[in-house]
Image: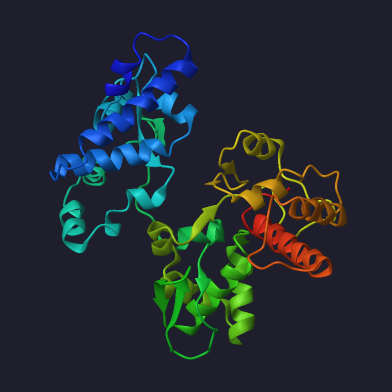
Amino acid sequence: DLMLFHAQHLDVPEEKIEQARAILPFVVEALEHEPSPYADYLRSELQELAERSDDYLFHEFLELVNDPVYFADFIADARAVGLDYLADTDLPSMFAGNMPDGTASRLFEVEDIVATEQYMDFIRNRRFRCTLLVRADGATRRTLATTDVERFLLATDLRPLGAWSGDDSPLGFGATEPAITVYDPVSKAALCILAEQRGDPMAYTALVEAVAARCGIDDAGAVRLRLDEELNLLRLVFAGVVQLHSSPPPCITAVAERPMVTALVRDQLAQGDPVTTQRHQVITLDPFESALAALLDGSRTLAEIHETMLAEFRAGRFVFDQKAEDDDLRASVCRLCDVVLERLAAAALLV
């Protein structure tokens, strides 16, 4: 409201954005020595706004028509025209079990799914939803079985924080700290194999075969039972550590001789924006990654990409921490380019 009020006399979008941003430091300065919870909340909000792009700021806060509604009210409007709530596209956001135990137990007592979702929105201060609606006269099955995951491709961003072993010793999975710790050798093998795919979705049947081979188990049914019940892949989906896919994303996970990103990504890089992967994730690249990715239109070979980025270092636009001789510089730049290309492939940016 403050930004709208401050920029209300302007019609040109660029000027409205400029003035909306100009008022934010004014509020920050006014709250500099204010210790109240309200001031802390505003400081947090203002910091987030300062990091947002101009297009987000304009369309989210400066549009003339901007009438937010609570989720429960939206569903009431949908039901009035013969539609009903199916689910959110972000499955983990729907699962009350991701809340603290006490909160989760209270939410599980609520029998109305719309009310449950609304309570969780209040608790999380959730502002955006990607809600799926269906015809109200159709049958909706809300009870999921652990075996339902068998119809999908599976992927994970977790990485094992150690080596797999065929005993019951603990193995953590995460980025740098364990997000989960697994003891069952079959479950550990499954997560290690998914991690080895570098985010590339794997069919459930292929996962079962790979786990059986690694663990030396002849009975595929026994492996399925362990994955569905012991590891409980469905629970990991709701926890957000395993993702489901109905089909493989249109990307490649190996670096081609003439690597390429999409035209959308190149345009986003030209605008200085975060980029959208082929898994529909938005990520931010560092300056070197951005400069290299901008070259990937499919017309340059790996050797040509190496030479172009080497010229960037020689021109002083990028530097290593320690000064290197030219031969060492060439080798270092080539290695860095190859590492970044592998990283772009793992992030589903190469096509």
Q: In the visual, does 271 lie left or right of 42? A: right
Along the line of sight, which residue is nearer the eye, 302 or 117? 302
Q: In the visual, does 59 lie left or right of 30? A: right
Which image quarter is the N terminus in?
Answer: top left
Total residue callouts: 0
> Residue at 39% of width from left, 34% of height from top?
138
Q: In the visual, does 10 lie left or right of 341? A: left
Q: In this view, does 324 lie above or below 59?
A: below
> Residue at 72% of width from left, 54% of height from top?
252
Q: In this view, does 207 lie above or below 292?
A: below
Along the line of sight, which residue is nearer the eye, 338 or 241? 338
Residue 218 in view here:
no
The quarter of the picture where residue 202 lies is bottom right
The quarter of the picture where residue 2 lies is top left
Q: Hey, which residue is sitting farthest bottom in the picture? A: 167
Instruction: Specify how the rendered protein is coloured.
Output: rainbow
> Residue at 37% of width from left, 23% of height from top?
20
Coordinates of residue 178 in the picture (x, y in percent): 41, 73
Coordinates of residue 77 in the picture (x, y in percent): 29, 22
Q: In the visual, does 299 lie left or right of 276? A: right
Residue 64 in view here:
yes
Q: In this view, does 207 lie above or below 244?
A: below
